[in-house]
Amino acid sequence: MIRGLWDALAVASFLLALLVVAPARADDELPLLERGTLIWGGDQEGGGPYVYPADDDPHRVVGFEVELADKLAARLGLRASFFQGQWDKMPDLLRARKCDIVLNGYEWIPARLDFMESTIPYYVYGLQLLARENGVVTSWSELERPSARGQRRIGVLGASAAQNYLLERALSSVEVVSYEGSTDAMREVETGKLDATLQDSPAATFYGSRFPALRAVGPPVGGGYYVIYARKGEKELVRRLNRALVAMIEQGEIEALYRAYGIWNDAQRELHEIARSGRFFGYAADGAHTPKQDAERQGGERHVEVSSRKRGLEVVRAYGGILLQSAGLTLVLSCLSFPLAVLGGLFIAMGRLYGPAWLKAPLAAYVEFLRGTPVMLQLYFIFFFLPEVGINVPAFWTAILGLSVNYSAYESEIYRAGLSAVPKGQMEAALALGMSQPLALRRIIVPQAVRIVVPPVVNDFIALFKDTSVCSVVTLVELTKRFSVLSQSTQATAELMAMTAALYLAMSYPLSLLSRRLELGAVKVPT
Amino acid sequence: MIEVRGLCKRYGTVDVLSELSLSVEKGKVAAVIGPSGGGKSTFLRCINGLESFDRGEVRVGGDVLTAHDGARERAERLRAIRRKVGFVFQQFNLFPHFDVLGNVVEAPVHVLGEDRAAAVAEAGRLLDRVGLADKKKARPDELSGGQQQRVAIARALAMRPEVLLLDEPTSALDPVMSAEVMSVISELAREGQTMIVVTHQLGLVRAIADTVHVFAGGRRVEHGPTAAIFENPSHDTTRAFLRKLEP
């Protein structure tokens, strides 16, 4: 799978981890039993039918993988606990011990076995091409010929098997466009921005009813196996998961579950063969499966339907609460990290202007380094790399640390400018009155500098509000991520977008007002 | 009271101050005059450590500042000297974020640790003395230049300095405001405040100075009792300078 820089980083950190991490433990004990929970990683932004927010209570996740995780955990004598992370960062989360397993439509790919352990498959998927009814894409074969009407734009889930499938084939008339969630691409096909989308068969089946304008083009292609990944060396956990999977397959529990979600098809019979043989060798199953979309159903069986699309005020009622809650996290992240950034920035600026000579070069380097690298990379370093060397910072504190350290660099430059703008005579007058330099800074210089820097600092605070959205890489579901998750699973994008924007505005506009008041000199320093 | 001996300061190859000496007795006023660029202000700023010097020493009461003090030693001695020496700047340098009263009580409260109420009462007396009792709540930018300079004098006096250094206190002011400030300074002289004043106002010098020191090119070219210097200057530079200011 092509994951570019992150892959390279992951491999590099993995190699480093090999040098650091302790040797494997004895074979048949399972340390998870002591804790009692099986923490499984997934991304609800991926949407249905895998893991997605429940209709009646968006705080709760549902989906066939949620039920699968519950059943597997129960068979292991554990309680399943969902861990939200960004889909393409799952292997990193696993390695950083944030979760025990990855169970989220992760394909069986030989390259992944170099750094993770894999179970036998729990689902056999195909890749379904979906296009607009009466659209320009009507068959696979026409995509292979150069087209007079230019390139066909085909949307895929970023870093997915579908993306890989298209890129490997390098079809001459296809431009591959990658999206963060699967239903984004479906909607874009509906609105005409994309010509088609290639989706894993469960998503295509599950969301079919939401996008009546789409229809399947040809039989599923490519395809392969969804497997559960565990940390390298966790052989005992994988052995027990395999045993549980085999039992669930043979007892028909898997079939009942998949039928409930409408994703059972003939291709799943291969699961029985694997269960019977007790062994699984991965192989490329290119075009081998021709699943029958509508397997006959037995009476009285459970059926999970995708809910009808909510509209207007209905969306506000259903998701206003959870969006408000995520806005709360955004607010807490900003309000905790910004004062730290201000304090850090002030000390850096004073160190650079008034500190001893030896301190100036390191402080300048600190500022340049932190300003010159993306905050996302810094968060990534704290969250995924530091655990390799034994420092495990929880997601929330990673975000606070990362944001405040990053912003302290920007803040310090503002204060440096502000402090330099206070006339030299002010420091001289203070020193001439017998003040020490620290006292002069505290009483005379800093209060004057603060007024000069109020507008740019408030500006930075507002920017930080919006920058908290990068914290989704460290598994926090703040306002923007919540918007993406809900938008993927409900398609009520316009309403959610308006609500999200309103919430951001409601948080940042009062700051602008405050800034204006401070500029007008409303703040007095006590004498 | 205050004694400066053999002060030397170089900027690169230029001697800004060379072998400058000057002493003032308690209760006396010394005036430093001379052409611009003669090192007068630099000399005054060396006394309270706003500028460093390369050779010589400054002695205020029992405290001695030399060119060779270590950093920590220098900081300690400077603080001791600065508590005894008040400084009035040409550009006033009032603290714009405090009102007039705040400017005056700042150092007594935060440097000397005086009780705030007592400091406020004392500040009231001082502001009364400089004729600004009604401006306590005004902010510096609401005052004229002359009023600002009088607040600056009150602010320096609030530390009860043994010596007051005034660096061209009237140069930034028009004649009317300049007169206000000069009358305050004359009053201080009458009350026996030890002072060194750098100025171009020869009227002020005649009125208050006990001794006059003429600086030119970083050297003290002539010094003596005020009357002697004005009536019978011995040096060409002094004669030329006096002619220029009092034709």
Image (cartoon, grey):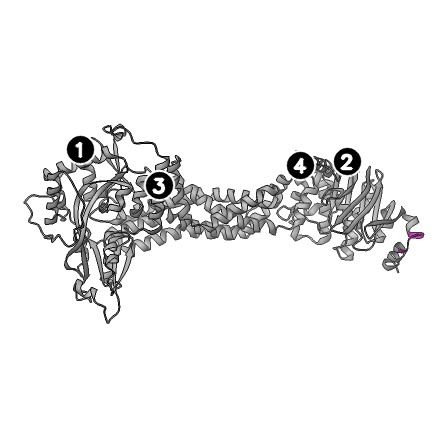
Residue lying furthest bottom in this view? A148
The residue that mark 4 highlights is: B111
Asked if badges 1 and 3 are on one and the same chain, I answer yes
Contact? badges 2 and 4 (CB < 8 Å):
no
The residue that mark 3 highlights is: A15
The residue that mark 1 highlights is: A75
Which amino acid type corresponds to the residue marked 4 in the rendered image?
Val
What's the CA distance linking mark 1 and mark 3? 33 Å
Which amino acid type corresponds to the residue marked 2 in the rendered image?
Val
Which amino acid type corresponds to the residue marked 1 in the rendered image?
Arg
Host chain of mark 4: B
Rendered-image quadrant of the C terminus of chain B: bottom right
Q: Residue at point 18% right, 50% down?
A: A284
Camera-near label (3 vs 4) is: 3
Q: Residue at point 12% right, 45% down?
A: A270
Contact? badges 1 and 2 (CB < 8 Å):
no
Q: Which residues are magenta?
A: B230-236
Q: Nearer the viewer, residue A66 or B136?
A: A66
* Neighbours of disc 1 within 10 Å: few (<14), some (14-19), many (20+): some
